[in-house]
Amino acid sequence: MAWPANNKYATVRAWLIQLLTNLPDERERDNIARELMTFRTGKSRAQLMIEPHPFTESDLNFFVASAERLSKHVPLQHITNQAFFFGRPFYVDSRVLVPRPETEELVELALSQFHASEHIRVLDIGTGSGVIPISIKLERPLWEVQAWEISKEAIEVASRNAQDLSADIAIAEVNVLWNDLPGGAFDLIISNPPYIPKRERAVMDQRVTDHDPSLALFVDDAEPLIFYQRIAAYAESHLTEKGKLLFEIHEKFGKEMQELLAAKFNTELYQDAQGKDRILKAERK
């Protein structure tokens, strides 16, 4: 494709949208074009529309290379190494999941469970890039926040994000399936563990299956609730008397999750913005 006729914002944007023809949705092409341009220039969309910006040949080459990677189902967040969560920029790459909007709803619910002025202890299990514990800590500075993660590579990313965003959280390498887990008493235990049965892989978006870490996504078809079982067992003896347990869950397993916890906990299901069962809250009976 020929270079754009000039380096004005509107012209370059229209040219970039044409580069993204492999993406079937026109609105998605436009949004991605705008995001690539703001990322490359460091200017907001409004600034680019108002202030002239001299797009260089290097910029255009970056856009061409990005369009090629997007055509191979590479997530935009892996091209920019940036994902916004709770209004903050987090570093992401193929070592961690790209954070989803529904997980922001999980954090919003977590923040509403205790007053900001309280001194409580929070544990996030399976922290990935650290978006959950970091967001909680930055929104509730008085809360003591710990995070567990099995992947050393994910811990590197979470630690980088904690440092970049000045979030004082403690991150430890822990596999919740271990027999001997660390002790402690927590007022809030929160987790977005792997919950997708492997049989669903075939119908999922390639941007997820090809580029997000399988370790953070999938569970064996025969034991889809294994992480919830182990976390709930840990919570039985490590939640404080008025402690709360919050899970992000598979939309198809809301009833099964309530049955799993029924013996020890009172539970409540919450739907996400799409009306799907997505969050489960549990409290001691």
Image (tube, rainbow, N blue to C red):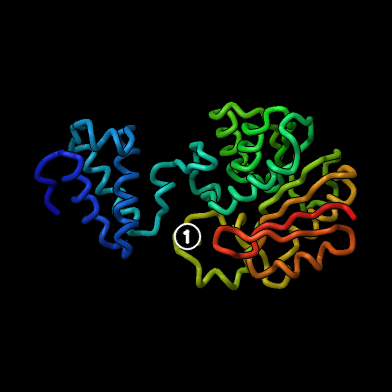
Is residue 37 visible to us here? yes
**Is 137 placed above or below 100 here?**
above
Name which residue lies at 72% across and 35% down: 145
> Which residue is disc 1 drawn over?
210
Where is residue 110, by image quadrant?
top right
Q: Nearer the viewer, residue 116 or 221?
A: 116
Residue 273: horizontal and vertical position, in percent?
56, 58
Name which residue lies at 40% across and 42% down: 80
Q: Secondary structure at mark 1?
A: loop
Where is residue 136, by image quadrant?
top right
In the image, taking residue 156 as reference, residue 64 lies left or right, namely: left
**Is 53 placed above or below 257 here?**
above
Is residue 153 visible to us here? no
**Is 201 placed above or below 185 here?**
below
Residue 86: horizontal and vertical position, in percent?
54, 41
CA neighbours of label 1 inside 10 A, class few (<14), some (14 to 19), many (20+):
some
Name which residue lies at 32% across and 44% down: 36
Q: Nearer the viewer, residue 43 or 211?
A: 43
Name which residue lies at 46% across and 64% down: 205
In the image, taking residue 268 as reference, residue 184 lies left or right, namely: right
**Amino acid type of the residue tagged 1 in the rendering:** Asp
Residue 156: horizontal and vertical position, in percent?
59, 37
**Is 229 placed above or below 58 here?**
below
Residue 42: horizontal and vertical position, in percent?
34, 32
